[in-house]
Image: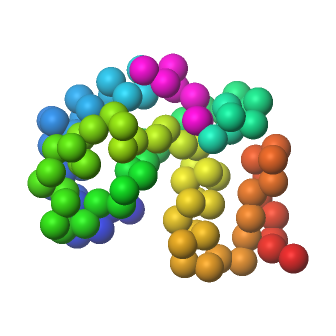
């Protein structure tokens, strides 16, 4: 779920157009799974440089295809959960497993 400062941005026509064009460019496939030879539908357009209240107004960060990555739900969860030290991991097949 979007943080409060980003909710209006994610509803904006600029973001919706950027997101939709990026999904089409990536043919709807999760980029991380595809790099492992897996074909899984991408669901979330992820910002590689995380959005902050300060940079959300910078189009080169918020609306730049070079800062975006199409991820499936599992890969997106792994990205954010790794950042906060969750107790789960994703194996190469895309399965969610408890960390050893």
Q: Which quadrant holds the N terminus?
A: bottom left
Horizontally, residue 99 falls left or right of residue 28, namely right
**Image coords of residue 35 (percent x, y):** 68, 34
**Image coords of residue 20 (percent x, y):** 33, 28
| Residue 72, visible in the rendered structure | yes
At 36% from the left edge and 60% from the top edge, which residue is drawn?
A: 50
| Residue 43, visible in the rendered structure | no
Quarter where residue 54 is shown: bottom left
Quarter where residue 97 is shown: bottom right
Magenta includes 61? Answer: no
Horizontally, residue 97 falls left or right of residue 19, namely right
Q: How many marks?
A: 0
**Image coords of residue 85 (percent x, y):** 62, 79
Q: How is the image coloured?
A: rainbow
The answer to which of 21 and 64 lies nearer the viewer is 64
At 18% from the left edge and 68% from the top edge, which residue is drawn?
A: 53
At 46% from the left edge and 41% from the top edge, which residue is drawn?
A: 69
The residue stretch that appears in magenta: 25-31
Q: Is residue 19 above or below residue 6?
A: above
At 34% from the left edge and 34% from the top edge, which residue is drawn?
A: 65
The answer to which of 68 and 44 lies nearer the viewer is 68
Magenta includes 28? Answer: yes
Q: Residue furthest right?
A: 100
The answer to which of 53 and 7 lies nearer the viewer is 53
Horizontally, residue 8 falls left or right of residue 61, namely left
Q: Is residue 93 above or below residue 88?
A: above
**Image coords of residue 68 (percent x, y):** 39, 41
> Does the magenta stretch mainly form a helix, a strand or a loop?
loop
Q: Which quadrant holds the C terminus?
A: bottom right
């Amino acid at each position: 779920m979007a943080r409060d400062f980003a909710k209006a941005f994610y509803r904006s026509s600029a973001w919706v157009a950027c997101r939709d064009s990026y999904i089409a460019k990536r043919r709807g496939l999760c980029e991380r799974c595809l790099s492992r030879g897996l074909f899984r539908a991408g669901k979330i357009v992820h910002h590689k440089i995380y959005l902050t209240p300060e940079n959300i107004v910078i189009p080169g960060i918020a609306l730049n295809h070079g800062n975006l990555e199409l991820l499936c739900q599992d890969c997106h969860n792994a990205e954010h959960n790794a950042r906060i030290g969750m107790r789960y991991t994703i194996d190469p097949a895309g399965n969610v497993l408890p960390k050893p």
